[in-house]
Image (tube, rainbow, N blue to C red):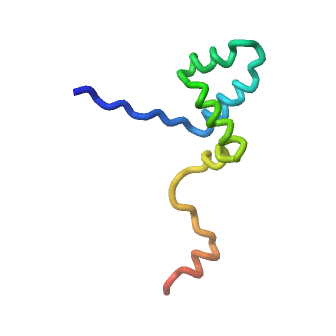
Amino acid sequence: MVPQRRRRSFTAEYRLRILKEADACTQPGEIGALLRREGLYSSHLVDWRRQRERGALQGLSSKRGPKPKHPAEAIAGRKD
């Protein structure tokens, strides 16, 4: 039985670094070389640029999990 391959996931920091490198490319073929080196598709750049324009990548850089409560909410929500 062949194990199933996991879908790759990319951190926001990695995506922003790749976009910065791609934006710095000025010569023909440089972006293609970058994509081959990193094992990415051009559609990754398209999606990530759209996310960057919407500001979604900055939101991804925060840690996941429950948000810390505001001190005032923590006191008001306590049952003594």
Residue 16: quadrant of the picture: top right
Q: Using the rendered view, name the quadrant where residue 37 is placed.
A: top right
At a point 57% along the width and 64% down the height, the residue shown is 68
User: Residue 14, how many percent across, how many down?
Assistant: 60, 33
Q: Position of residue 29 (x, y in %)?
A: 68, 13
Residue at image coords 26%, 26%? 2
Q: Residue furthest bottom?
A: 80
* Relative vertical location of residue 60 with respect to residue 22 in this rendering, above or below: below
Which corner quadrant of the image does residue 19 belong to? top right
Viewer-closest of 44 and 64:
44
Where in the figure is residue 51, as x and y percent of width and height?
65, 42
The mark total stands at 0
The quarter of the rendered structure image containing the N terminus is top left
Residue drawn 56% across the image and 50% down it: 63
Image position, residue 61 (x, y; %): 62, 45
Q: Specify whether 63 is left or right of 23.
A: left
Residue at image point 55% right, 24% down: 40
| On screen, residue 8 above or below 29 | below
> Which residue is situated farthest in the left direction here?
1
Q: Residue furthest right?
A: 26
Above or below, comparing residue 23 to residue 28 in the picture: below
